Image (spheres, rainbow, N blue to C red):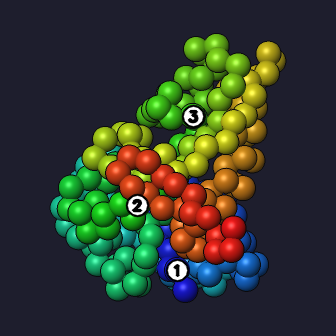
């Protein structure tokens, strides 16, 4: 069974979507642990409602990243849980250095735009401000840059003339909740493989 460690800071809607995919029995994967840097976060509450192992680990002294002690604590918790893949689900800390070395090419993130366009924060607002007619979401491997890792999957979302940032973001989130579990399932089943900066779908036997 492919074991997932999920890190999040917010409401946990993508974690719930992934949990539903795991519970369906259609994929060889399970959530081994849910960790958060926010003690009263929705993701921890929802994980506990689903009877999943869930823990708060203090992030330390920095605002946008984990400090050294926190980083070690997160790595230890994930290793103890025996995770095969680290899944970022609205985790608002930049992961660098030792953490990524501990899980090489095994940390994935979901970004609310079609990378490499509109990296960083509030990507849906960036897309709306720029005037693009199509945006979407991207599942990618996390590397040392900000939203620069190899792209695993993308899904488009149209930008409508009367969209507000909130309406566009909500429509992107609907697509995210389908794309993220499907991409993780493809990794779990060995149907999706990363080589260098490119991801490849592996044909099923008999095709």
**Residue visible at 31% across and 41% down in the picture:** 145
Label 3: few (<14), some (14–19) or many (≥20) C-alpha neighbours in 10 Å:
many
Left or right of residue 138, residue 174 in this image: right
- 125 or 110, which is in the foreground? 110
The picture places residue 195, in percent across and down from the top left corner, at 39, 55
Q: Which residue is drawn at 75% across and 39% down?
A: 171
Residue 114: numbered disc? 3
Which quarter of the figure has residue 36? bottom left
Q: Is residue 109 visible?
A: no
Q: Secondary structure beneath disc 1?
A: strand
Q: Nearest the camera: 43 or 40?
A: 43
Name the element at disc 2.
Answer: strand
Q: Where 197 falls versus 201 (above or below)?
A: above
Residue 75 % position (x, y): 29, 72
Q: In which quarter of the image is the C terminus?
A: bottom right
Residue that numbered label 1 is attached to: 2
Nearer-N-terminus badge (3/1): 1
């Amino acid at each position: 069974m492919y074991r997932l460690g999920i890190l999040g800071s917010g409401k946990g809607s993508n974690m719930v979507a992934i949990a539903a995919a795991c519970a369906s029995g259609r994929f060889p994967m399970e959530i081994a642990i849910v960790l958060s840097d926010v003690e009263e976060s929705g993701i921890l509450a929802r994980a506990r409602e689903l009877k999943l192992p869930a823990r708060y680990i203090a992030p330390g002294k920095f605002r946008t990243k984990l400090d050294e002690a926190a980083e070690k604590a997160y790595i230890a918790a994930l290793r103890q849980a025996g995770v095969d893949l680290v899944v970022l689900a609205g985790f608002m800390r930049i992961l660098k250095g030792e953490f990524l070395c501990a899980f090489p090419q095994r940390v994935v993130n979901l970004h609310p735009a079609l990378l490499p366009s509109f990296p960083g924060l509030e990507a849906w607002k960036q897309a709306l401000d720029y005037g693009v007619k199509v945006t979407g979401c991207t599942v990618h491997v996390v590397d040392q840059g900000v939203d620069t890792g190899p792209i695993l999957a993308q899904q488009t979302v149209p930008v409508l003339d009367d969209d507000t940032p909130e309406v566009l973001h909500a429509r992107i989130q609907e697509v995210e909740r389908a794309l993220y579990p499907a991409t993780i399932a493809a990794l779990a089943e060995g149907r999706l493989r990363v080589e260098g900066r490119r991801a490849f779908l592996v044909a099923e036997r008999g095709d």
